[in-house]
Amino acid sequence: MAISGSGPSWSVAAEYRKFRCRLRTPTGRIAFREYRAGQDDTVKIDRVEIREIRMRLREPFEGSTGASHNRRVLLVALHSDGITAWGECVAGETPAYSYETTDTAWAILTDLILPKVAGAVMETAADLLPAFEGIRGHPMARAAVEMAAWDLEAKAGGGSLASLLGGVRDSVPVGVSIGLQRTDEELHRKVTEYIDEGYERIKVKIKPGRDVEMLRGLRDRYPDVPLMADANSAYSLEDLPRLRELDALGLTMIEQPLAHDDYLDHARLQSEMETAICLDESIRSVRDAQLALELGACRIINIKPGRVGGLSSARAIHDLCVEHEMPVWCGGMLESGVGRAHNVALASLPGFTLPGDISASRRYWSEDIVTPEFVLDGGTVSVPSGPGIGVDVREDLLAEWTVRRADF
């Protein structure tokens, strides 16, 4: 089932229904494709591996839900006839952002998903959908495999992931996300550094007590710089008077001010504010995006493929938003270069009209796991044009940083 190049009408649910009907066996169970070597475009996944690596951030990154000092990163590799394809699980170390964590994802992947993937046959990433049957939720765990499958499909076909997804850009505009700082002076210093480096948009984390006055001082000092605020669900509707004060600051958006599952209150808040509300944690699927659109809960959506179950879901959300003329941008989850490569490919799609959180590798890491690393050039990051994700995982660092692995 070829799904690349689909337009706004493309639907994950519709494609999945057709897929299930086609692969339904006489017993009613779902089966993987049959491998016919040399007879079609299928590839067999010979071996699967998962690794946990430890990466140390150059500096702590703090939001309203807490601070990160190190990252426990899960990497999934699919091996097929000399090709190695990569995906990354973006789950955090604690359930602060999502109920998924590094450890829950490891358990779901090693116990339930990867044993089914080893030996499977695929032509497109959608052909691995049976591996996810019987698993409710856990989109971050599922995304690690789904995105690796997209990388494999692109590499097997000899093209770039961006091209397979339908990307139209060879570079994407990027902004930078700045965590909570101890003082306004430290915040101003960092903003100055990133503006000088060429970032096109500045995002600042906020929480009650570090919000209006802090942002007002930043706006006074940088009157023309595109600024946005990210609250990570730190507020409620009781804070409406406080949040309304942000309207005077000319922010491009306020990201996820209320609870992750509170669509109605986000709709009420948006109706009371001039500044655009952007939803992040609230959007986990196409259905969530449709609900937000129907309720008027936001005017912008942040799409993170690792949060929504992978690139197929991310592209479907993008297509829905294009159809409804809603701007989208690609967010980040402190990914290594593997996850960043997937994000950059996604951000090359035409509907991503706002700078994303796809900073240069050295923004977060002293050394990245991939080569070449991602670098900032005139406010943009280049979209890799090589096969698949277009970057190589460094085997030396992979061996050095691995703390556990499993093979299937």
Image: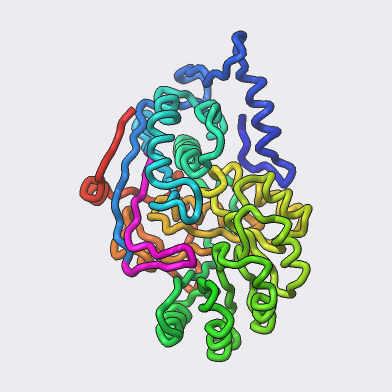
Is residue 260 rendered to the left or right of residue 110?
right
Q: Residue furthest front?
A: 238
Residue 109 is inside the magenta segment: no
User: Quick check: can you spot residue 348?
Assistant: no
Query: Does residue 383 appear to the left or right of 286 in the view shown?
Result: left
Q: Tell me the quadrant of the picture where the N terminus can be found.
A: top right
- Residue in front for this viewpoint, 289 or 67: 67
Q: Is residue 22 above or below residue 274?
A: above
Q: Residue at image x 26%, y 41%?
A: 404
Image coordinates for residue 233, horizontal then vertical, percent: 57, 62
**Whole-percent x and y of residue 99?**
49, 47
Examine the residues drawn in magenta and state their main secondary structure.
strand
Does 38 appear above or below 377?
Answer: above
Location of residue 392 in the rendering, given as x and y in whole percent from the top left corner: 35, 49
Residue drawn at point x = 45 percent, y = 30 percent: 113
Q: Which residues are magenta?
A: 58-76
Residue found 62% across the figure and 17% down from its top: 24
**Left or right: 314 with respect to 150?**
right
**Of all residues shown, which one is farthest toward the bottom?**
220
